[in-house]
Amino acid sequence: MAAATSPAPASQRYWEIDALRGLMLVLMTVTHLPTRLTDPLGQPFGFVSAAEGFVLLSAFMSGLVYSRVGYRQGVDAMRSAFMQRALKIYMAQAATLLFLFTFIAAVGIRIDQPAVKDLMSFYLVQPRDGFLFGLLLVYEPALLDILPMYIFFMLLSPWVLAFALRNGWLAIALTSTAVWAAAQFGLSEWLYRIAADWTGLRVPFHEMGAFNAYAWQFLWFMGLWLGASRNAPDAQPLKIPTWLLAVATAVALYGLYWRHHGPNGQAAFGANDQLNMLFDKWQLGPLRIVNLAALGIVAIGFGPALARRLPRFHGLEAMGSASLPVFCAHLVAVLMVLAFFGSSQTARPWWGDAVLLAVVFAGLYAVARATLWVDRRKAAAEARLKAS
């Protein structure tokens, strides 16, 4: 017996993927908001965070959608669609940065909020460089460092996908793996030193985002391949052998047990920093990839049967469908909480945390619904224009 995922029909949108992306947004919001749930719900399924799930799922959807454009309208149309999406993400990043540099900075300075001052320390010391290099996606304050990585991936993706459509994925997989391996041994730092020596770059390395994009590209391009493979003319159902599903289930369950019942919580090996690098989030350590792969195999193996039995979570679907506006709205909410209340996870009673989470999630859901309503209006207007 084997689990299988069939090729995607031309018009299909995976509601399950939207629901999972919505779940990742919920988990990211709970992790970033300073409440009593921050630590218990951090890496809830093992030594894997919501960020990995969100990146992988977004890459899958990008591969699914844009390869379909490539097959039906050609590579130029696919490249244009990627660039339009990258521009949209850049505008979202720029707007969020401006909110941080103006409103949040003013509030943080006025009430002397350490959480805000630590978050944007480089900008407060070098406001001109911080503003300029922030818009150039070089300076990436904490929490605002994932969208620049997305833009980087979106700009690379049309070239990678066009090559894969012509020549297959083997060369891309090998190259991506090699770059990931080099990232584990200081590729980012080496390239930074070269750039700083040649250009006199004044942004410190630690202010250029916590995510190592040279490592995380592996996750993106593997997800892109998985999504694009569903549209290939000769695509076959994705079959998972029973033995592999059994091994993956054992690994996933062990990771879950180790994370929640081990002696060290989210730090797999406690104070042993060298061993913890094997699970490191920012470098996308090798054991972290193993844990994520096991969870992915389990999701593919058991997900379809589970989806048929569970009710559809339309709220999560809406948030996943409008992932970019909801992600930016979650950043705005987190920044405002940090500015007004600080980063203490125990500053409020339990009921205060419950009220805060309820208000934030109501706002995120409203953003999702409003976004989808606007999108439907635009689609209807375009349909009427084409019909006239």
Image (tube, grey):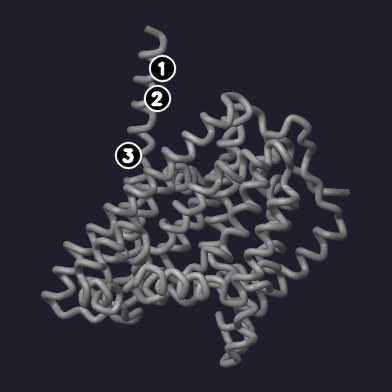
Q: Which amino acid does label 3 sit on?
A: Ala
Residue 47 appears in the figure: no
Q: Are marks 1 and 3 in contact (CB under 8 Å)?
A: no
Q: Which amino acid does label 2 sit on?
A: Ala
What residue did someone put label 2 on? 379
Residue 360 in the image, given as x and y percentages of width and height: 32, 59
User: Tag 1: residue type?
Assistant: Ala
Query: Looking at this rendering, what residue extends furthest in the left direction?
Result: 110
The answer to the question of whether label 2 and label 1 lie on touching residues, with beta carbons closer than 8 A, is yes
Which residue is disc 3 drawn over? 370
x, y percentage for residue 59?
57, 49
Residue extending farthest to the front is: 198
Identify which residue, 53 or 206, lies in the foreground: 206
Q: Distance between the residues labelled 2 and 1?
A: 6 Å
Where is residue 246? Give x, y as percent: 82, 62
Q: Is residue 139 above or below residue 117?
A: above
Spatial separation of the CA atoms under disc 1 and disc 3: 20 Å
